[in-house]
Amino acid sequence: MVCLETDFLVALMRKNKNALGKLRELVSKGERLSTTPINAAELFRGVYSSGRVEDNLKKVRGLLGRLDLLDFNFAASEIYGRISSELEKEGEPIGEFDALIASIALAHNERVVTRNIKHFGRVEGLEIEEW
């Protein structure tokens, strides 16, 4: 199972060749595709900030409807507290949303497909797949 991060999802909606190729690769391997409520919220924020709300709503709803949405559960809450605190103590915070996304992926034992290696690479134990 693999968790698709916001940068990848946006690239898919924009029909980016690299993202589409990565999607084909994941599907051909039989990967179960998921995302988090945080990623979904980021996509909807982008929709409502755009000049084409109705068109973009259809795209986002269509894409999210094809993915499993991972729960932000008790385990993810504890993981979030740990990683967010550790990164802040190290002077290397990654931002609240990315810390939440990472904690949800860790709680569900999923790797994250992203290009944001700078942030997600700081999270100990998080498996990252760059696209």
Image (cartoon, rainbow, N blue to C red):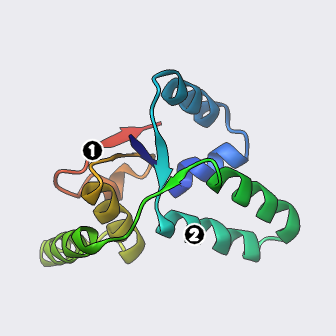
Image quadrant assignment for residue 78: bottom left
Residue 73 point in image, percent of width and height:
32, 71
* Kind of residue at badge 1: Glu
Tell me the residue that label 2 is attached to. Answer: 42
Quadrant placement of the N terminus: top left
Name the image quarter holding residue 65.
Answer: bottom right
Q: Which quadrant of the structure image shows residue 129?
A: top left
Tell me which residue sits at (45%, 46%) in the image. Answer: 115
Mark 1 surroundings: few (<14), some (14-19) or many (≥20) residues within 10 A = some
The kind of residue tagged 2 is Glu
Q: Above or below — where is 70 with respect to 74?
A: above
Q: Nearer the viewer, residue 95 or 23?
A: 23
- Depth check: give the residue in front, 16 or 73: 73
- Provide the secondary structure element on which disc 2 rests: helix
Residue 26: horizontal and vertical position, in percent?
A: 49, 29
- Across and down, in percent, residue 36 comes to 46, 61
Name the residue: 76% across, 55% down.
59
Residue positioned 87% across, 68% down in the render:
54
Determine the CA span between mark 2 and mark 1.
21 Å
Q: Point out the tag, 2 or 1, that comes first from the N-terminus.
A: 2
